[in-house]
Image (cartoon, grey):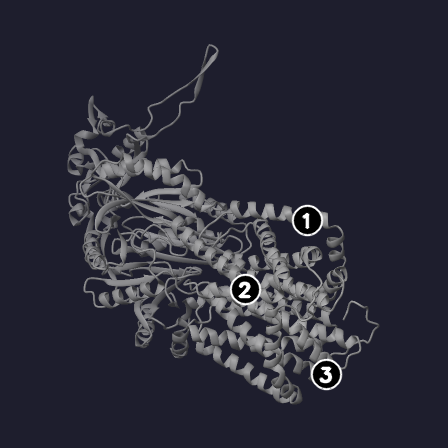
Amino acid sequence: MKITNFAVKNYQFTLIIFVLVSVVGLLTLFTMPRSEDPTTNPPQYLVTVIYPGTSPKDMEEQVVKPIENKIYGLENIDKILTTIEDGVAAIQIKFKYGVDVDNKYQEISTEINALKNGELPKDIYQIKTEKISSGDVKIIQTALISNTASAKQLRDHADILKSKLEKITDLREVKYSGMPEQEIRIDMQLDKLAQLKIPLNLVMGSLQSEAADIPGGSINLDDKVFNVKTSGKFKNVDDVANTVIYNANGKIIYLKDVADVSYKDGTINHITRINGHRCILVNAAMKDDVDISKVKKEYMPVLDEFNETLPENIKMVKNFDQADMVAKRLGHLGFDFGLAIVLVIITLLPLGFRASVIVMISIPLSLALGLIGMNMMGFSLNQLSIVGLVVALGLLVDDSIVVVENIERWLREGHSIKDAVLKGTKQIGLAVVGCTATLIIAFLPLAFLPDMAGEFIRSLPVAIITSVLASMIVALTLVPFVGSKILKTHTHGEGNYFLRKLQQFLTFSYRRIMKVALRWPKVTVGISILLSGLAFALFPLAGFKLFPTSEKPMFLVNIKMPLQADIPESDRVAKLVEKELKSHEEILYYTANVGKGNPQIYYNVHQQDIKPDFAQIFVQMHEDASPIEKTALIKKLRNKFKDFPYAKIEVKDFEQGTPIEANIVVRVFGENKDTLRALSFKVEELLREHPGTFFINNELNAYKSDVKITIDKEKARTLGVMTSDVDRVIRLAVAGLNVGDYIDDRGDSRNVVITVPRDKFSNLDALKNLYVNNLRGAPIQVSQIATIGFESSPTAINHFNKSRFAKVTSLTKENVLANDILKDIVPQLDKMNFPKGYYYKLSGEAESEGDALGGNFLSVIILSGFLFVAVLLLQFKTFKGIIIVLSIIPLGVLGGVIFLLLTGNPMSLVSIIGFIGLSGIQVKNSLLLVDFTNQLRAKGHSLDIAIHIAGETRFLPVVLTSITAICGLIPIAMNPNPQIAPLAIVLIGGLISSTILSRIVTPVMYKLIPPQIDMEETPEYQR
């Protein structure tokens, strides 16, 4: 081959290039971004609207529908999922993959800002628009613990730590939580205000005017420019209390005359504890494409220095540090990598010392070249890309082994070093290129897997593709060059001791069986067809689960309280659960979050927003806890909390892959809420009756009661009272109204809230003695024009693409797969008599599988299939050759499925990756046999002689490459991470079965359908 001739003849140039590759590869290894999981930036966004005290029905009409109508008009919308609960609406927006993520974020922000100034209520507490990305995950969670320090003291220290961490350039989203912020609260005495006949709107207008911060601009004085400073914001409580709210007939009324103005903590909506101790949490996320180990070196000194400044009554505990997990996981994979190299070295012994050295040189250079390619394409070093490199380790030596073994064979036959290197490489070169092309094409569909699952897993196939491509370049250039310098002519034509023994073993093993197989070729093919059928028949026994559970020693305990439980009651029940967790020695930390979810510490579990009847406990076991120990503890806790009297307790493990609410989710669509409710009961009953389900949840199981203020509009108009003024007064009394902000002693902006005198939480007393001014300014008691009552309403309202739906969710019991349950449930759902306009759709794991494996993925699979065939046609020029080569694939599938069943692993996305990669490896091995048989026949050998010689000659490198790949994969197969182990298990099982059976099936298939060979004058090197 020309490239080989160039590399050998211009060896100085070859040497310099590969030294350069080594240096750049080493630098790349140390400078590549490191993270636990791949960086993902899906075109997904979350719009959260917080409007305290608003029922789901009012949220739907006043907030959600205007937002949905605006967003739905944007281009390339894929789906919009909306969840509406008390005072909170979460609108998840997903665009089609391929759009510009930043542009779409700007479009959404523009639409939301336009709505804020138009259709949406003016007193909404907060609207936030977020991009969903892997960067949302908090890499550190630190707790400041104290049972005696004041809330202000804890807040101040948390704020100091926040300020210090914010100065680290690679950190983002530094926040603290668990304590309400301090505010200036104005407790209005509405009866006194009514006596003085001062309109409430006037008071609020005066406060808002005083709180306004309008820069005065600048003026020129002589030859200088001076800025003009105006009154500015409120500075302290006295500024607010001394605000003039009324001035008539020479009488000045200050705010302090009609209100109690003081510093107070805001409404408690989030309580945090760690191991039962009161605390405040400080969390920080990391920016994309940075090395987490370097970031840790920046924030650890800050944490250590800060810890020394804390008073004795406050302790700091860093309970979560993703950098430690990354170091442990990457260290484990690094050990696997080292072990794989050792095992690969052992398998190279039959090649001889010098040949083995050449192959060992090719390994780091191929990986270095692969790393450079990955880095240029923007991929990081993470758990999946490292797995890809370890898998590639077993594959990339194949090309070098095949080339070196062929050169060695020529040397054993007595040829000169130059002839053996150039002609031996040329003889095998085209087959090496074809093998590499088929292997790359096999992994190509995985690089184009659609949706978030595809983006998440993409670094794995890319690592394999770049490394294997690099290995081909190294095998055809560096290997011949180094071989020409260090290989020697053999004195023993049969090779070294190990090679002779291996060759004898292979010859002895197949001598008898090959004679029988070639004598009865049709019977042999029939048996292989039966084995192939068995392989596909075993698939259903394995089951299917797209992504496995996480192996990390941590999980969540979700506490779902009875409807409308308040924060104090949720807190009481959370303490009971914490008491049980304390009794388990294997638990290191348990962090309780009452009224809100724990800050996001896992890539696909987002934080639950404010919800008084919800609590979540983040449980962390000791770092050396195995997945088996974690599963046992989860099972024990589920049994313990199964009949818990005060709340539903969900002990939930983290899942790999795309975010899902539950294993099984059934959505029932329709407009009438009563009909939806009735249908949801039927679905719930179906799920409850199945033995494999537990923790079934139906949001419409019970309606909640809301306090309804009914305004007599006719009477109100008669008295000159505007309905909006009544609504404003009621909101002021119950939730409070923000009228401005002030600058606290740390320079941060805090709220100034106007309300009525009340305790920590509002109750019905807040609605007593309320006054509203009519158009003439006269005070009218609210009770004269409004009555208080109760009404029922749904706990939550859900929309999917603007269509209302009810959902019933279920988790699956241990060792039960969602797909197996759905096989039983779906036929029953299909038989249900849905009214016209009502229907169901599956979500959860079923939807996730459809997103990951449907649509574009099938197109890529078909395209790759045609490319596969095209490459083989270029190689063999005949369809018979293709059929012979591809006939081995089902036999490899048999080994892969059997190994999955033996290890108890279900079919999953990583298993599919294994089977796809396996097909490429098998074709490569079979291709070497068929290609050499064609060469021998072209030289004039008879069919039987060509089959015999090719089998004896080419089966040795096939066995060597297969053993090398298997040994390289063994450490991955033994890895406790269920996200990566099944890949290696499938490849090992498939390689064992296909290697054993290909020696029989491929020659037999060749004898049955021998390809047409043009008899040509064969050059000397093709021997």
307 versus 667 height, above or below:
above
Residue that extends furthest to the right in the rendered view of this protein:
1017
Q: Secondary structure at mark 1?
A: helix
Of 876 and 559, the residue lying toward us: 876
Q: Quadrant of the N terminus?
A: bottom right
Near-viewer residue (740 or 767): 740
Mark 3 is on which residue type?
A: Asp
- Rounded to the nearest angstrom, the CA distance separating label 1 from label 3 is 44 Å
Residue at the disc numbered 2: 346
Residue 908 visible in the displayed image: yes
Q: Going by the image, does 801 lie left or right of 531?
A: left
Going by the numbered disc 2, the residue's amino acid type is Ile
Amino acid tagged 1:
Leu
Q: Nearer the viewer, residue 765 or 712?
A: 765
Q: Tell me which numbered mark, 2 or 1, is placed earlier along the sequence.
A: 1
- Which percent across, then down, holds residue 747? 32, 30
Are there few (<14), some (14-19), or many (20+) residues within 10 Å of tag 1? some
Helix, strand or loop under label 2: helix
* Residue beneath the point at 25% across and 37% down: 182
Left or right of residue 791: residue 218 = right
Vertical position of residue 578 compared to residue 853: above or below: above
Q: In front: 716, or 760?
A: 760
Tell me the distance, in whole angstroms, between the alpha carbons under discs 2 and 1.
Answer: 27 Å
Residue marked by disc 3 = 944
Q: Which residue is mark 1?
A: 15
Is there any visible trace of residue 452 in the rendered image?
no
Say left or right for 408 vs 88: right
